[in-house]
Image: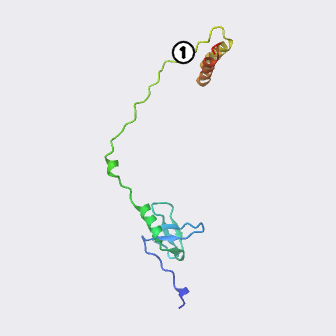
Amino acid sequence: MPASDHPTPVPDLGTYMAEDTTEGTPRLGKVTAWDGELVHLEPPGGGAPWSAAPAGLRRPSERERALIRVLTRPVTATRSAARAPRTFPEPPVVLSVEPVPPAVPAPGCATCALAAERERQQLRDRDHSAAVDSRIEMRGHPHGRP
Protein backbone atom coordinates (compact mmCIF):
# COMPACT_ATOMS: atom_id res chain seq x y z
CA MET A 1 0.00 0.00 0.00
CA PRO A 2 1.52 3.42 -0.94
CA ALA A 3 2.37 5.89 1.84
CA SER A 4 -0.30 8.33 0.58
CA ASP A 5 -3.04 5.75 1.24
CA HIS A 6 -2.29 5.66 4.99
CA PRO A 7 -4.74 7.78 6.94
CA THR A 8 -3.28 10.73 8.86
CA PRO A 9 -2.88 9.86 12.53
CA VAL A 10 -5.28 11.67 14.83
CA PRO A 11 -3.72 13.37 17.86
CA ASP A 12 -4.69 12.19 21.31
CA LEU A 13 -7.39 14.05 23.22
CA GLY A 14 -5.96 16.71 25.51
CA THR A 15 -2.76 17.27 23.53
CA TYR A 16 -1.86 20.65 22.13
CA MET A 17 -1.42 21.01 18.39
CA ALA A 18 -0.54 23.84 15.99
CA GLU A 19 -2.23 24.69 12.72
CA ASP A 20 -0.38 26.90 10.23
CA THR A 21 -2.48 29.73 8.80
CA THR A 22 -2.20 31.88 5.70
CA GLU A 23 -1.47 34.93 7.91
CA GLY A 24 1.76 33.28 9.04
CA THR A 25 0.78 33.04 12.71
CA PRO A 26 -0.02 29.48 13.75
CA ARG A 27 -3.18 28.72 15.70
CA LEU A 28 -2.52 26.76 18.87
CA GLY A 29 -5.19 24.54 20.36
CA LYS A 30 -5.97 21.67 22.69
CA VAL A 31 -7.62 18.67 21.06
CA THR A 32 -11.09 18.29 22.60
CA ALA A 33 -12.83 15.90 20.18
CA TRP A 34 -12.59 14.03 16.88
CA ASP A 35 -15.69 13.26 14.83
CA GLY A 36 -14.08 10.92 12.30
CA GLU A 37 -13.16 13.66 9.79
CA LEU A 38 -12.25 16.79 11.76
CA VAL A 39 -10.32 17.41 14.95
CA HIS A 40 -11.95 19.94 17.29
CA LEU A 41 -9.61 22.27 19.18
CA GLU A 42 -9.89 25.11 21.65
CA PRO A 43 -7.25 27.82 22.21
CA PRO A 44 -5.09 27.71 25.34
CA GLY A 45 -6.40 30.16 27.91
CA GLY A 46 -9.88 30.24 26.35
CA GLY A 47 -11.46 31.54 23.19
CA ALA A 48 -13.59 30.35 20.32
CA PRO A 49 -13.08 26.67 19.45
CA TRP A 50 -12.46 25.63 15.85
CA SER A 51 -12.17 22.48 13.75
CA ALA A 52 -9.34 21.36 11.48
CA ALA A 53 -8.39 18.41 9.33
CA PRO A 54 -5.82 16.12 11.00
CA ALA A 55 -3.50 16.55 8.01
CA GLY A 56 -3.27 20.31 8.68
CA LEU A 57 -2.09 19.88 12.26
CA ARG A 58 1.44 19.51 13.60
CA ARG A 59 3.19 19.29 16.96
CA PRO A 60 3.98 22.74 18.40
CA SER A 61 7.55 24.00 18.30
CA GLU A 62 9.49 24.66 21.51
CA ARG A 63 8.62 28.36 21.34
CA GLU A 64 4.94 27.56 20.80
CA ARG A 65 4.99 25.12 23.75
CA ALA A 66 6.42 27.89 25.93
CA LEU A 67 3.57 30.18 24.86
CA ILE A 68 1.03 27.45 25.66
CA ARG A 69 2.54 27.07 29.16
CA VAL A 70 2.22 30.82 29.73
CA LEU A 71 -1.38 30.93 28.51
CA THR A 72 -2.51 27.93 30.56
CA ARG A 73 -0.68 28.70 33.81
CA PRO A 74 -3.09 29.75 36.56
CA VAL A 75 -2.57 33.15 38.12
CA THR A 76 -1.82 32.97 41.84
CA ALA A 77 -1.64 35.73 44.41
CA THR A 78 1.86 36.71 45.44
CA ARG A 79 2.84 37.14 49.05
CA SER A 80 3.18 40.90 48.72
CA ALA A 81 -0.31 41.12 47.18
CA ALA A 82 -1.76 38.93 49.92
CA ARG A 83 -0.24 41.14 52.63
CA ALA A 84 -1.00 44.47 51.01
CA PRO A 85 -2.83 46.78 53.41
CA ARG A 86 -6.41 47.55 52.59
CA THR A 87 -7.00 51.04 51.42
CA PHE A 88 -10.25 52.91 51.41
CA PRO A 89 -11.23 55.80 49.19
CA GLU A 90 -11.33 59.31 50.55
CA PRO A 91 -14.66 60.46 51.98
CA PRO A 92 -17.00 62.02 49.43
CA VAL A 93 -16.88 65.74 48.78
CA VAL A 94 -19.97 67.46 50.16
CA LEU A 95 -21.08 70.40 48.06
CA SER A 96 -23.00 73.30 49.47
CA VAL A 97 -26.72 73.34 48.88
CA GLU A 98 -26.76 77.11 49.18
CA PRO A 99 -26.95 78.82 45.78
CA VAL A 100 -24.06 81.02 44.79
CA PRO A 101 -25.08 84.67 45.08
CA PRO A 102 -25.22 86.51 41.76
CA ALA A 103 -22.23 88.60 40.78
CA VAL A 104 -22.42 92.32 41.43
CA PRO A 105 -21.76 94.49 38.37
CA ALA A 106 -19.27 97.33 38.61
CA PRO A 107 -21.03 100.64 39.20
CA GLY A 108 -21.60 102.59 35.99
CA CYS A 109 -20.40 99.81 33.64
CA ALA A 110 -22.98 99.04 30.93
CA THR A 111 -21.22 95.79 29.90
CA CYS A 112 -21.27 94.44 33.47
CA ALA A 113 -24.93 95.48 33.93
CA LEU A 114 -25.87 93.62 30.73
CA ALA A 115 -23.90 90.52 31.84
CA ALA A 116 -25.60 90.63 35.28
CA GLU A 117 -29.05 90.84 33.67
CA ARG A 118 -28.19 87.92 31.36
CA GLU A 119 -26.99 85.91 34.39
CA ARG A 120 -30.26 86.52 36.28
CA GLN A 121 -32.29 85.45 33.23
CA GLN A 122 -30.16 82.32 32.75
CA LEU A 123 -30.59 81.38 36.43
CA ARG A 124 -34.37 81.80 36.08
CA ASP A 125 -34.20 79.51 33.01
CA ARG A 126 -32.05 77.07 35.06
CA ASP A 127 -29.21 77.34 32.53
CA HIS A 128 -26.46 77.32 35.14
CA SER A 129 -23.64 76.78 32.66
CA ALA A 130 -24.53 79.93 30.72
CA ALA A 131 -24.97 81.83 34.02
CA VAL A 132 -21.41 80.92 35.01
CA ASP A 133 -20.21 82.14 31.62
CA SER A 134 -21.92 85.50 32.19
CA ARG A 135 -20.38 85.75 35.66
CA ILE A 136 -16.90 85.05 34.26
CA GLU A 137 -17.43 87.67 31.57
CA MET A 138 -18.41 90.20 34.25
CA ARG A 139 -15.41 89.43 36.45
CA GLY A 140 -12.94 89.46 33.55
CA HIS A 141 -14.20 92.74 32.06
CA PRO A 142 -11.66 95.56 32.59
CA HIS A 143 -12.82 98.56 34.60
CA GLY A 144 -10.11 101.11 34.07
CA ARG A 145 -7.49 98.95 35.80
CA PRO A 146 -4.09 98.53 34.11
Q: Is residue 121 left or right of residue 95?
A: right
Q: Is residue 44 left or right of residue 101?
A: left
Query: Residue 96 placed where, x, y %?
Result: 47, 21
Rendered view: 30 above or below 87: below
Query: Residue 38 placed where, x, y %?
Result: 52, 73
Rendered view: 77 above or below 36: above
Q: Residues within 10 Å of mark 1 (few under 14, many from 20)?
A: few
Q: Residue at x 54, y 90 (%)?
A: 2
Query: Residue 125 placed where, x, y %?
Result: 62, 20
Rendered view: 94 above or below 29: above
Viewer-proximal residue among 146 and 79: 146
Q: Which residue is mark 1?
A: 101
Q: Amino acid at mark 1?
A: Pro
Query: Residue 12 placed where, x, y %?
Result: 43, 75
How many labels sit on residues?
Answer: 1
Q: Residue at x 32, y 48 (%)?
A: 82
**Which residue ends up furthest to the top in the rendered image?**
108
Q: Is residue 119 left or right of residue 99?
A: right
Q: Residue at x 32, y 51 (%)?
A: 79
Check disc 1 and report its element: helix, strand or loop. Answer: loop
Viewer-proximal residue among 28 and 124: 28
**Which residue ends up furthest to the bottom in the rendered image?**
1
Question: On the rendered image, what quadrant is the C terminus found in?
Answer: top right
Residue 136 in view: yes
Residue 31 in view: no
Q: Residue at x 40, y 33 (%)?
A: 90
